[in-house]
Image: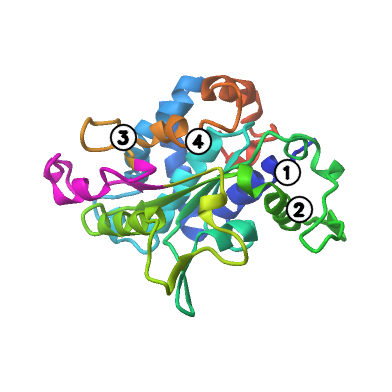
Amino acid sequence: MQNIVEKLREECIKRLFTTDGFAAAWPTWQSVISTKAPTPTPKQIINLGDHLREIFYSTNTSSARSQSDVSGGGANWEALVCWYLNLCSIGRRTVVIKHNKALIPTPISNAITVNYGNFISNTESDLIAITFPDKEEYRIDKDEISIIDEDGQPVNLYTRRNYNFLDVLNALVARDFSEIEIHIIQCKTNWNDNAQIPMLWDMIYSSTAFRADITIGREGYNINNARLFSYAFATVPTVRLEKIKRASVAVSRVRNLSGGNYWGKASEDGIASSVKEMLNRNLANGSNISHMNSIAAIIPELNNSGIYSYFHFTN
């Protein structure tokens, strides 16, 4: 049995490993992960969020340029954060998607669209976390779902042998949009050069008044109609840590983001929270049990023969 939420998660993670940069970095990253979660336990897995910067930098060599300068470094950071948040969300109704039209339900893409006159623009939504409602269709086997699309037609679950998971999700999200949570997570390796971007996008999404030719949402969908919406920033960071102060402009710009400011290190008061804190702050509503308990239930299935082997958690 596999429900539609876990089917989407599997598709998201498998796509990460099809990219050359992530696939090349993974053997090195995985070896560091195994030292941080050798047992593993739920606490060790959650605490990987405190070490994502160290994991990310482990692919550097003394003769190589900084990871921030390597082509695809930013995409690798997005993928690493996506991998970690999904690992901690297995068994819950929350999935984190690295932006891809083939994975994101159309109603959600429409809801986050910003319209400037006739020009359509989407935020730099590197990752989109979706928390689905506690309804039967998200719990039962994906092959047992019966759903009608927006045109009133039954959704075909399969085309030949391929499961039409996006068609199914489009119909479910259209029906349940007011009960769905949307959390955008912008991921950047460099903090100083990019802090202004999430600040401005969060201001746009949070604003209640625009000029007449600026609107949010299209095709009948708007973030204001979702159950919850937030915009977060997650950075490595690649800048030297001693340069980051509470009074730094870059810190001030992201201090009040609706979804919070995070980095791949342990939390530091007044500067940034560990990426692991995103689990409780933004992604807590995907189950009626804690992340500790949901992770404990799936650990036996993370090995090479388990149903979550596609995470490649072990060698």
Q: Marks 4 and 2: CB-CB under 8 Å?
A: no
Q: Which residues are magenta?
A: 231-260
Residue bearing the label numbered 1: 4
Res. 305 mark: none
Q: Marks 1 and 2: CB-CB under 8 Å?
A: yes
Of 293 and 39, the residue lying toward us = 293
| Left or right: where 298 falls relative to 236 | right
Residue bearing the label numbered 2: 168
- Seen at 31% across and 53% down, the residue is 189
Which badge, 1 or 4, comes first in the chain's sequence?
Answer: 1
Residue bearing the label numbered 4: 283
Which secondary structure lies at badge 4?
A: loop
| Type of amino acid under label 3 | Ser
- Seen at 45% across and 78% down, the residue is 117
Of 100 and 167, the residue lying toward us = 167
Q: Is residue 235 above or below residue 51?
A: below
Q: Residues within 10 Å of mark 2 (few under 14, many from 20)?
A: many
In space, the residues marked 3 and 4 are separated at their CA atoms by 15 Å
Kindly indicate the quadrant of the structure image that contains residue 208: bottom left
Residue 40 on image: x %, y %? 51, 22
In space, the residues marked 1 and 2 are separated at their CA atoms by 8 Å
**Mark whose residue sits in front, 1 or 4:** 4
| Type of amino acid under label 1 | Ile
Q: Residues within 10 Å of mark 1 (few under 14, many from 20)?
A: many
Which secondary structure lies at badge 2?
A: helix
| Type of amino acid under label 4 | Leu
Of 45 and 197, the residue lying toward us = 197
Residue bearing the label numbered 3: 273
